[in-house]
Image (cartoon, rainbow, N blue to C red):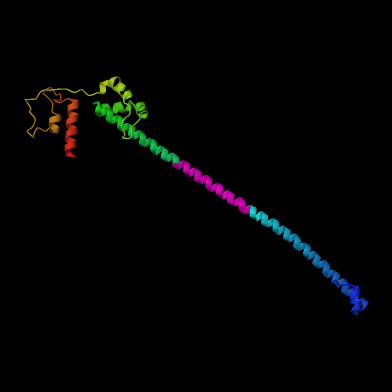
C-alpha cells in the first residue's frame, strides 16, 4: 500500500508531521529510483562486457590455432622435403651402383671405370631399375661402350705358359705375384681381364 496523506491523517498524524513524512518518503523513493536506474545501466554494461570478453576469448583461441597450424604446416613441409631429398639420393646411388656393375661386367675397370661413370651422368639419371636393383634396359650404355667408351674396355690377352717363370707349386692356384708377373719386356704375362678374374677368385676364397 502506497503511503499517502489520507492514510497518515486517518492514523491521527498531525498535518505538520504529515508534510515532513511525505517529503522524506518522496526523497527515499526518488533515491531508490535513481539506484534502480543505475543498477539497470550497470547490468546492461555487464552484459556488453561479457559479450566482449567472450569474443576476446574466441579471437584469442582462433589466433592460437592459426599460429600452431602455420608452425605445423611449416614443419611438415620441411620434413616432406627432407624425405624427398633422401629418397632421391638413395635412388641415385642405386642407379650408380647398377651402372658401375654393368660397366665392370663389360671389362671397364679401375681408372677407366671412373672415367666412364663421370661421362655417363645423364644415362645414370635416366636409368630405370627393377625390384632387384638391376637395370631394366642397357641400350644407352651399350651404345656408349661400343662408341665413346670403346677405348676404355680392357683387352683380354692370351699367353702361353711361361716356362721361364713357372707358377709356384701351390695346388694350381694363382697368387698375387703370379697375377702381376711380367715378362722380360716388362709386360704383364696375364691380360687385364684375366688379372681381374684371378683377383676376384682370390678375394672370394679369402671371404
Q: Name which residue lies at 12% across and 30% down.
A: 178
Q: Please say whether residue 15 is one of the residues in the magenta stretch.
A: no
Q: Name which residue lies at 36% across and 37% down.
A: 90
Residue 68 picture location, percent across and down: 53, 48
Instruction: Give the left or right position of residue 118, taking residue 193 as reference.
Output: right
Q: Please say whether residue 63 is one of the residues in the magenta stretch.
A: yes
Q: Quadrant of residue 33?
A: bottom right
Q: What stretch is highlighted in magenta?
A: 56-79
Residue 9 picture location, percent across and down: 91, 77
Residue 120 picture location, percent across and down: 33, 26
Q: Name which residue lies at 36% across and 26% down.
A: 122
Q: Name which residue lies at 16% across and 35% down.
A: 202
Question: Is residue 16 depicted above or below 71 in this figure?
Answer: below
Question: Is residue 40 depicted above or below 72 in this figure?
Answer: below
Q: Quadrant of residue 85?
A: top left
Q: Quadrant of residue 104?
A: top left
Which residue is the extreme one toward the bottom?
Answer: 12
**Quadrant, the C terminus:** top left
- Report the predominant secondary structure element of the magenta stretch: helix
Instruction: Give the left or right position of residue 125, taking residue 113 as reference.
Output: right
**Quadrant, the N terminus:** bottom right
Instruction: Give the left or right position of residue 102, taking residue 184 as reference.
Output: right
Amino acid at each position: 500500500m502506497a503511503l499517502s496523506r489520507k492514510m497518515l491523517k486517518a492514523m491521527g498524524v498531525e498535518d505538520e508531521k504529515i508534510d515532513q513524512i511525505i517529503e522524506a518518503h518522496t526523497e527515499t523513493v526518488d533515491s531508490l529510483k535513481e539506484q534502480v536506474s543505475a543498477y539497470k545501466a550497470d547490468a546492461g554494461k555487464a552484459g556488453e562486457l561479457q559479450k566482449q570478453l567472450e569474443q576476446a576469448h574466441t579471437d584469442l583461441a582462433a589466433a592460437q590455432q592459426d599460429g600452431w597450424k602455420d608452425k605445423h604446416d611449416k614443419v611438415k613441409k620441411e620434413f616432406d622435403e627432407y624425405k624427398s631429398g633422401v629418397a632421391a639420393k638413395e635412388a641415385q646411388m642405386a642407379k650408380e651402383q647398377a651402372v658401375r656393375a654393368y660397366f665392370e661386367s663389360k671389362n671397364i675397370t679401375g681408372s677407366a671405370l671412373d672415367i666412364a661413370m663421370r661421362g655417363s651422368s645423364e644415362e645414370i639419371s635416366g636409368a630405370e631399375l627393377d625390384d632387384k636393383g638391376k637395370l631394366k634396359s642397357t641400350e644407352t650404355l651399350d651404345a656408349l661402350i661400343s662408341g665413346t667408351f670403346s677405348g676404355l674396355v680392357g683387352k683380354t690377352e692370351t699367353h702361353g705358359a711361361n716356362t721361364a717363370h713357372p707358377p709356384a707349386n701351390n695346388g694350381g692356384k694363382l697368387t698375387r705375384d703370379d697375377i702381376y708377373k711380367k715378362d722380360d719386356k716388362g709386360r704383364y704375362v696375364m691380360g687385364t681381364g684375366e688379372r681381374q678374374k684371378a683377383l676376384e677368385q682370390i678375394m672370394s676364397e679369402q671371404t
